[in-house]
Image (spheres, rainbow, N blue to C red):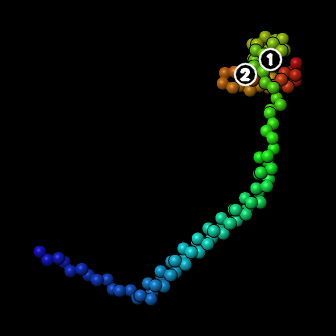
Amino acid sequence: MSRPALRRLPAADPLARLRAACEAQAAGLRAQADALHASADALEALSDALPTLLAALRQPAVAPSTEYLSLSAAAARLQVNRHSLAAALERGDVRGTRIGSRWRIPVSALEAWS
């Protein structure tokens, strides 16, 4: 069995191939340079913001000043029925936060309602 003869493609001009390879490499280098400039701009913005960020991190953590009560404790403090206070919470008359099935009521909301 004989193999079919391979057809040779015409050889391109070596100078044109070299020129095309150089142009492709130059385009890649331009893209890399653009990416480096963008990275440098981002780093400069971060370095400008760094003192502010560090100052914020150095601030002492402050405990929340709001004291929260459970529904039962709030009702006892107000000397009302738990169900009456729960209804007021549901209506929105008293400010409170529901965590799962339990209510947490800020003391300041009780003072405003009573």
Q: Secondary structure at mark 2?
A: strand
> Mark 1 belongs to which amino acid?
Ala
Q: Position of residue 39 (x, y in %)?
A: 65, 64
Q: Position of residue 112 (x, y in %)?
A: 88, 24
**Residue 29 against residue 38 in the figure, above or below:** below
Location of residue 81 (image quadrant): top right
Q: Quadrant of the C terminus?
A: top right
Q: Position of residue 13 (x, y in %)?
A: 40, 88
Residue at the far left in the pictured view: 1
Q: Quadrant of the N terminus?
A: bottom left
Q: Which residue is depicted at the point 77% across and 46% down?
A: 57
Location of residue 107 (image quadrant): top right
Q: How many marks?
A: 2
**Residue 78 against residue 109 in the figure, above or below:** above
Marks 2 and 1: in contact by CB < 8 Å?
A: yes
> Mark 2 belongs to which amino acid?
Trp
Q: Which residue is mark 1?
A: 74
Q: Which residue is mark 2?
A: 103
